[in-house]
Image (cartoon, rainbow, N blue to C red):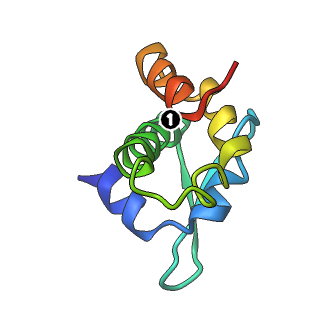
């Protein structure tokens, strides 16, 4: 429940800006702009949820929007498991 709650309140751009770094992780609440410290495990769990959400929606996006998050999605490799990465790699055509 907590991961779903955090996913619902987080500002996506703030979340994505932390991809690939080993520093403490935070999310910004989109309703009140409060910063919440989260664990690396919570961050990685949010990455899995973010990827699952994007993969589910990706085929329905207009062609000119499909790869707007290409660089961010590529950085997900360091935060998700091999199975999720394999699916993401195939959908986003990473090499």
Mark 1 residue element: helix
In the rendered view, does 62 fall on the left or right side of 74? Answer: left
Residue under circle 1? 44
Task: In the displayed orientation, state which residue is furthest to the left.
Answer: 1
Q: Nearer the viewer, residue 65 or 40?
A: 65
Q: Can the viewer see residue 24 in this picture? A: no
State the residue at coordinates (67%, 33%): 74
Dividing the picture into quadrants, the one containing residue 34 is bottom right
Expressed as whole percent of the image width and height from the top left, the position of residue 89 reads 56, 24
Query: Measuring 51% from the left and 61% from the top, which residue is drawn there?
Result: 62
Q: Is residue 59 visible?
A: yes
- Residue pictured at 38% horizontal, 52% vertical: 57
Residue 13: x %, y % from top left: 65, 63
In the rendered image, residue 24, in percent from the top left (x then y), is placed at 69, 43
Residue positioned 34% across, 45% down in the render: 56
In the image, residue 63 sits, relative to residue 9, either above or below, namely above
The answer to which of 58 and 25 lies nearer the viewer is 58
Answer with the quarter of the image where residue 33 lies. bottom right
Q: For the image shown, how many numbered marks are present on the structure?
A: 1
Q: Is residue 26 left or right of residue 60?
A: right
């Amino acid at each position: 429940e907590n991961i779903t709650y955090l996913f619902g309140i987080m500002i996506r751009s703030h979340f994505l800006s932390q991809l690939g770094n080993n520093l403490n992780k935070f999310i910004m609440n989109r309703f009140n702009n409060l910063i919440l410290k989260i664990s690396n495990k919570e961050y990685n769990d949010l990455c899995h949820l973010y990827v699952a959400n994007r993969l589910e929606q990706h085929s329905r996006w207009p062609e000119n929007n499909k790869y707007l998050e290409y660089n961010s999605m590529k950085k997900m490799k360091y935060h998700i498991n091999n199975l999720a990465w394999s699916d993401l790699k195939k959908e986003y055509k990473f090499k």
